Amino acid sequence: MKWGSRPWLRLFLMVVGVVSLVLALGVGAAALWAFTILPRSLPSVTALETFQPLAGTKVYDDNDEIITELHVERRIFVPLAHIPQTLRDAIIATEDRRFYSHFGVDPIGIARAVWQNYRRGRIVEGGSTITQQLTKVLFLTPDKSLERKIKEAVLALELERRYSKDRILEMYLNQVYFGNGAYGVEAAARTYFGKSVGELTVREAALLAGLPRAPSSYSPFEHGEVAKRRREVVLRRMVEYGVLQDAEAKRLARTDLGLIPPERRRTTGQYFLEYVQQTLEGKYGADMVFKGGLNVYTTLNPTMQLAAEQALRDGLKALEGRTVKGKTVDHPEGAIVTIEPQTGYVRAMVGGYDFFRSEFNRAVQARRQPGSAFKPFVYMAALEAGFTPASRVEDAPVSYAVGPNGQSWKPDNYDRKYRGQTTLQQAVEESVNIVTVKVQERVGLGKTIQVARRFGISSPLHMNLSLALGTSDLTLLELTSAYGALANQGEWLAPVTVRYITDAQGKLLEEHVAEPREAVSPETAYVMTHMLRGVVERGTGIAAKVLGRPIAAKTGTTNDYSNAWFVGFTPRLATGVWVGYDRPRSLGKDETGSRVAVPIWVSYMSKVLGDSPREDFPVPDKIVFVPVDLDPSNECVRVVTMAFVRGTEPLPCGRRPAVPAPLPPPAVPAPPPGPQAAPGSPAPPALPRQAWPLMPGAQSSAITTPGTAVPGAAPATPITPGVLAPLPPSGGAPTRSPEVQGP
């Protein structure tokens, strides 16, 4: 049969020829693009020979020992020779079992993956080789596109041409991400098992080998059962690869994950480090912090930090154990801050029970009512106004008309008892609310706020008498810093977390220079310190007396027991403790600062102080000590030694002055005489400066010095209406500020 007799065959062959020619041209063009044009747009794989990880910021403790590094990726390079064969086998069996036989791209592996995914109806296996995965990690973006896959294949071929299989495997094992911030096998081994990669067992190696495919989904910390099933898959593939016996694989599959215990997962000082990091980013920017190679030398003391974290966890567990019944969503939280008064250095900072449970730093970010822990500012204002620890105030019911409607506010004492004539010393020790409010009224709100500002208190303070009972929200850091100024003889220093910083070349960028500021005179600071020592010796903080050394402190508890505080100091350290719920609610009946915060403080400080020498507070030259009777009879019934600035001291108990000494003048000019005291009240004393200016509707009170006959209630002298602002709307002024009396 002749060729021309079958025109359809000729047409068919022509079409085939044209199609083949087009395909050949297309393949040729694609090859030309892939091997000549595309490589020009790809990074050079020779960059690996000079590759250097980004230099993060190194953070050091107070002994110049490195604590951590702040970087974009946590990576610790380790040579292939130090990586156990079991881990290498597990990775290859799982990710690329033909690694040592293909040329960078594995057509057989791709075909197998396509078949398995088709057979299962879902993606169960990938076709990328280890070399391709390495190129994606080092050079490409993770987007899913044909162009990216072609680039990945071309780079993989180039890598295989230039480097040995072992070198490629080494780079891969040091680059791949294993989750929880760990890049590379060494960082992963430390993160999940708390050991070096060279110490990994077969079951641990199998767990790590299963993570690179989906680190978040297979995270053993977050999804234990899922991670265990993934490990079983790896063990089966190791059997198929011929590096593990089937019986051994089945035995290992039944074992637990063997993870590092939860308590060891916590890196010491996370709240402190986060606070430092935020400070650095605000000053230098994120790029400099994470890529600039800074060296940051902090004030953190690791021993104190570890002890603080443990004491807080133990204390919160104990509180929850006795107050929480059954399962609950909310857990009590707390914070601890320790400051060195002479430098302002923050030696320890704990912002909560567990940083990984909540990153909210309650030491610096949470503002809470300090309750009676605010009272020292009231009494320091009184000392500056001329009062002394021996000045007496009538502890008796009193009421004040507050707000635009003149509603009655009646402060009360926690124990509902009234002590009559009470010295300021006793009022501080036993946290007597009524006496504190009356002292605040006499001194003036402006004076107390002025004193608090000098001590570094920057939070807003309410202009009403409830301020005396701690109704204005403060942070633990600022309150602890303020107490530290008393230990530093009245000089306040701003809290500091960084001593100095150098750049990558060691050049000094900044260095902290202490700039003390006098908050009160050394004499006033010592008198207040001595008053606060009585809190530990005889008052609400007596549980801290077990430490057997000079400690000055104050407890604090707010209405409904929603906040528990204890801030105390020795001559060298000031430590504050706060406990409460993130969403304010009661900690439980009678869960006061004395019961909740003091034990945490004592547990922590006992470890910090240890067997260090007993050190007393330095006494200024102008300070004298006088025995004073807490009993109004002045017959030496309840004698307490008090500290006074020379010239203000009373006669020792048992002796009476011939002429009563006048009290300091009032903080505001006395208005015209108001209504007289109730009928039957004793006549007022013949000392005009002893008449207290009271708020409209307030009951009368009197103040005397030891050795002076105690008169009856003075006539009420009203202040111009409108002096008192309405009480705080957030929580309302407490009708009483809870404070435990005695132990």
Image: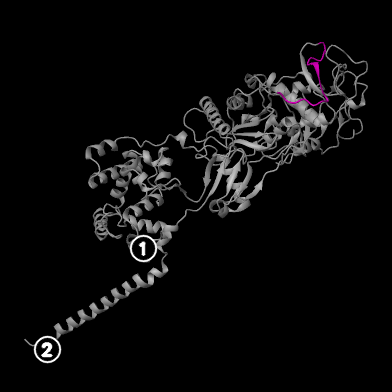
* Circle 2 residues within 10 Å: few <14, some 14–19, many ≥20: few
**Taking the image as drawn, is residue 650 in sight?**
yes
Q: Nearer the viewer, residue 529 or 440?
A: 529
Label 2 SS: helix
Colour convention: one colour
Q: Is residue 629 magenta?
A: yes
The image quarter in which residue 550 lies = top right
Identified by mark 2, the residue type is Gly
Mark 1 lies on residue: 155
Q: Is residue 204 magenta?
A: no
The image quarter in which residue 592 lies = top right
**Taking the image as drawn, is residue 430 in sight?**
no
Identified by mark 1, the residue type is Leu
Magenta highlight range: 616-635
Q: Residue at x 39, y 58 (%)?
A: 136
* Circle 1 residues within 10 Å: few <14, some 14–19, many ≥20: many
User: Above or below — where is 493 with respect to 379?
Assistant: below
Marks 1 and 2, the one that precedes in the sequence: 2
Residue 717 picture location, percent across and down: 87, 30
Mark 2 lies on residue: 4
